[in-house]
Image (cartoon, rainbow, N blue to C red):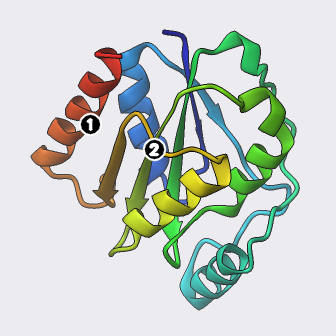
Amino acid sequence: MKTVIVYYSMSGNTAQTAEKIAAQLGADLLRIAPVTAYPDAGAKKFIWGGKSALMGEAPRLQPYKFNAADYDRVIFGTPVWASCYAPPLRTFIKENAPALQGKPFAAYACQGGSGADKALKKLRISLGIEKFAAVLALNDPKDRPAPENDKRIADFCKLLKAE
């Protein structure tokens, strides 16, 4: 099954996880980024990102190439901001909604604390689907590496390979 991982990453946790999943599934990677970057340090990082996520903002994205017809499945990767998925994914979904319809989806979230379950539920609702083929939540896997993270990634990929 031809798969693409569409993700946004600020601090590298979501990017590192995307690379590990892609290596196991042979998936393509599509990193999306807003035209205006979010602050990535200090209080501004949490205030600006949290506000943007909670307010449902959809920032303009840097140019990217994506043709949904090239893929059988889409995996979304996101950091968790205020129990929400990252706003750049909201923009991507809005820009590609008709082409994404009917495709199976999976998703993973990287978090510093908690909120991944709520963020993934909001992402699922935004996609208009009942459930994901597989979900994964990790706590800062790049910044706080742990052997169980690789096992959880492998289990996530195993579920997707079984489809």
Q: Where residue 162 appears, x then y in whole percent?
A: 28, 16
Spot occupied by residue 141 in the image (x, y as percentages of width and height): 30, 53
Residue 2 higher or lower than 143, as above or below: above
Residue 130 tag number: none
Q: Which residue occupies the foreground of this view, 130 or 77? A: 130
Give the structural element (helix, strand or loop) at label 2. Answer: loop
Near mark 2 (Cα within 10 A), the count class, few <14, some 14-19 or many ≥20, is some
Between the C-alphas of marks 1 and 2, the distance is: 19 Å
Q: Decide if residue 79 is on the left or right side of residue 34.
A: left
Q: Quadrant of residue 45?
A: bottom right
What numbered label is drawn on residue 153? Answer: 1
Counting labels gives 2
On the image, the x and y values in percent for residue 138 come to 30, 55
Q: Measuring 36% from the left and 31% from the top, which residue is drawn there?
A: 20
Quadrant containing the C terminus is top left
Residue 64 visible to an observer of this rendering: no
> In the visual, does 128 lie left or right of 139?
right
Q: Earlier in the sequence, mark 1 or mark 2?
A: 2
Q: Could you tell me which residue is drawn at 20 percent across and 32 percent down?
A: 155
The residue singled out by tag 2 in the image is 131
Query: Could you tell me which secondary element the residue under label 1 belongs to?
Result: helix
Residue 80 appears in the picture as rendered: yes
